Amino acid sequence: MAERATISGKRLGIPVTVATTIVGTSIFATLGSPQQNLVRQIGTGLLSLAAAVLSALHTFFNFAKVSVQHKAAAADAACWAFPWARCCW
């Protein structure tokens, strides 16, 4: 379960980073042009909205913390199941 949370965090975190990088670059690229394309503006706006939603989900679910909690729970459960193991001392 901990690995699943780590993978889910990366599945959301990487697209957020890529999307915000593209949006930031697009905004700076269009600042210098006198004539801006409407399709490019709409696409940049939608990508910015998607990045904001993904970022909010990534923050809300906090997969890194969930992963640490699952690893701690697994270690604790192992100590209860195998009290003679050295990791429990």
Image (cartoon, rainbow, N blue to C red):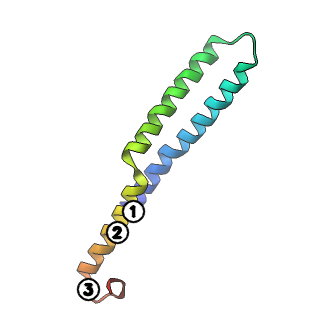
- Circles 1 and 2: CB distance less than 8 Å? yes
Q: Amino acid at mark 2?
A: Ala
Q: Position of residue 49 (x, y in %)?
A: 49, 27
Residues at marks 1 and 2, CA–CA distance in whole angstroms: 6 Å
Q: Position of residue 27 (x, y in %)?
A: 66, 24
Residues at marks 2 and 3, CA–CA distance in whole angstroms: 16 Å
73 left or right, relative to 9: left
- Residue found at the very far left of the displayed protein: 80
Q: In terms of image quadrants, where is residue 66? A: bottom left
Q: Position of residue 18 (x, y in %)?
A: 60, 39
In the picture, the disc for residue 83 is 3
Which image quadrant: the N terminus? bottom left
Q: Secondary structure at mark 2?
A: helix
* Relative to 15, residue 63 above or below: below
80 left or right, relative to 33: left
Which residue matches tag 2? 72
* Residue count near mark 1 (Cα–Cα under 10 Å), binned few <14, some 14–19, many ≥20: some
Which residue matches tag 1? 68
Which image quadrant: the C terminus? bottom left
Q: Secondary structure at mark 1?
A: helix
